[in-house]
Amino acid sequence: MPRDEIPTLLGSLSDDPRRTDMGGFSDDFRSPCDILLNPYAIFSRRSTAVRGWITKWQPCLFGKMAAKDNRIHVVVIDDASLAQGDEFLQKKISGEKKKWKQWSAGGNSHSFLLVVVSPRIHYAAPNAALRQLARWFESCIAEESLPDVEGNFVSNEWLYLRNPQSGKYYKFRVNLDFFASSGDKRWWHDHRFPGGLAFTLNSVGHMARYKQWYSHDADPTAWAVKTAMMTIEQAHNHPQHGKATQLRNLSLDGKTLKGGTCPFRNIEAIPPRLRDKDWSVYSGRYHTDHAVRDEFFDGSESPPIGEGSHALDFSYLMDSIDQENVELMAGVEITEEAFFQEVGNPGEHRRFSPEDEESPTPDMREHTESPTIPADEEAKILRALEVCQGWLDED
């Protein structure tokens, strides 16, 4: 019988020697961590903590929207789950992904979020040991992981959506992304997450087609490009290292680097700060398609230098004959049989999506009765929960 890897991987972690010099973690980590790292916190409270933090503090506007609208399928792995070993974790992640795909076919979710919370991971140094642990979870989540010409791996999955007008099913390729507590205050600050590690599968194409097919948005491409540009524009401006991703200016004659048709029918409808920016490309200290990135764990406190920034592409958001871009944004039509083969016939699904219920019900992934909680821990959780819920409730 193969030996579990998780205990060894966790045992190899070491505390971050730089965290004290950095003045600890950012203040916005305090409330979510008071819930995520508390062994008495039940799932619904942890879900509120991560959704609230994403809504308020994560720069990705696609993620913010999904969190605000409760369209993120949240999965939490804590110390109790980690203690169950490799097989338990692999089955849990596989099962949660299948439920996510079932629920997403009707537009109930666009995003999958796996959060691995543990004090050992939260305080861990971003070194080879943490990278190895992150790669173990990456291998559990992604259906396919291939080396990219720019370095690292591009890991992806498939998500499905039914067109309610035609009844046809479409599949969308969605890339895996990675976040960690150790990124807080470092040059890759935009990839931080409270409590430990986090992995996201966030399908912009699925969101765009949902807006088109279910909300009757006539121009989902313009929405997607504008939202992506605003996400890059809002990147954290590190006091020593500047922004890890940046928009580029249009040329003096108003042209983009890659050319093509402007996605905006009415330029006056986009924010003024975007009007002189290139909508075809942007630049980044890291490649935004990569998952667990080696440069986050190389021991350097500065971003990679010497080879210039990555030339990153917005063109996948627009109409394209490129097959990969079609898979990411337009979706590829598949048969009903192929969809059922992947996620199961709806008549065999064992759980309804909470969004499909006629009246609110407790989350079906936690016990209806909470464990006995010491009064001081309950008070601590409730104070933190009020803060996180407040972030969710903000306009």
Image (cartoon, rainbow, N blue to C red):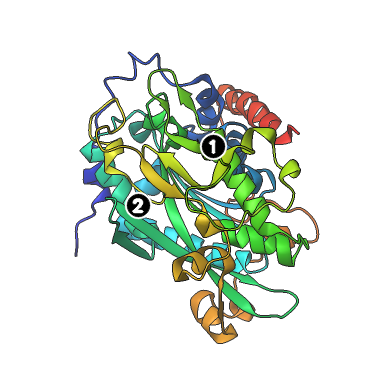
Residue kind at label 1, given as amino acid type: Leu
In the rendered image, residue 161, in percent from the top left (x then y), is placed at: 62, 69
Q: Which residue is mark 2?
A: 137
- Which mark, by number, is residue 380? none
Q: State how far apart marks 1 and 2 are (Cα).
A: 46 Å
Quadrant in which the N terminus is drawn: bottom left
Dot 2 lies on which element?
helix
Viewer-proximal residue among 280 and 154:
280
Q: On the image, which quarter does residue 162 sit in?
A: bottom right
Q: Residues within 10 Å of mark 2 (few under 14, many from 20)?
A: many
Instruction: Using residue 3 as the reference point, say whether residue 137 is left or right of it.
Output: right
- Which mark, by number, is residue 252? 1
In the rendered image, residue 324, in percent from the top left (x then y), is placed at: 45, 67
Q: Earlier in the sequence, mark 1 or mark 2?
A: 2
Dot 1 lies on which element?
loop
Residue kind at label 2, given as amino acid type: Phe
Can you say whether 34 is above or below 50 in the image? above
> What is the residue that sits farthest to the right in this orientation?
358
> What is the residue that sits farthest to the front in this orientation?
253
